Image (cartoon, rainbow, N blue to C red):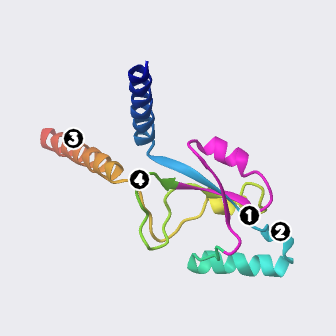
Amino acid sequence: MMKKTETRKAQERAIHKAQVEAVADVYLVVQRRPLSEKPFLWRQLARLVYWAIGWSSDYGVEYQSVCTTESEARYLSSADGWSYTKVPVNGCLPAETCQYGTHDFPLSEASHWYRQRKLPHISFPQHEVIRLEAKLLSSSLELAERYRQA
């Protein structure tokens, strides 16, 4: 009986490990004091600093959840001062501030700005770069063939 239980537990661990390895990205849900509590001028100044140099203080940030879907992260972070950010699993973003995926404060008056932000540096998984390079090479070969036939 004990051997059967151990085998089942080992199988469950293997299944769980495979499920975790299949996830490429997750969404980190955090809470901080809402910027909306500050006077208008201070809110605009904080946002100016954020947009101008890509920096914000992590003072008072409380990590609340990790979600495997953006819709779940958006739902859970729909409260004043809450946000979510896409981050890689078993990987690390570069030290430079970069754009990797969605970063949003769903209930913020500036939510649309956060979702549409364009930072100077972009980061994405290497397998995506390889896929795009292959597509570009394929397109280039097709174009070269068309010109040769014309």
Q: Amino acid at mark 4?
A: Asn
In the image, residue 1 lies at what x, y percent?
43, 18
- Helix, strand or loop at label 1? It is loop
Q: Which mark is residue 110?
A: 1
* Nearer to us in this view, 13 or 93: 13
Left or right, 13 with respect to 104, comes to left
Percent coordinates x, y for residue 58 in the rendering: 64, 73
Which mark identifies residue 36? 2
Q: Given the image, on which type of amino acid does mark 2 rest?
A: Ser
Mark closer to the observer (4, 2): 4
Q: Which residue is the site of mark 3?
A: 142
> Number of labelled discs?
4
Marks 1 and 4: CB-CB under 8 Å? no
Q: Which residues are magenta?
A: 59-86
Name the amino acid, label 1: Ala
Residue found at the far top of this picture: 1
Residue holding disc 4: 90
Residue 56 in the image: above or below residue 104: below
Q: Position of residue 121 (x, y in %)?
A: 45, 69
Tell me which numbered mark, 3 or 4, is placed earlier along the sequence. Answer: 4
Alpha carbon separation for disc pair 3 and 2? 53 Å
Q: Is residue 89 left or right of residue 128?
A: right
Q: Earlier in the sequence, mark 1 or mark 2?
A: 2
The CA span between labels 1 and 4 is: 31 Å
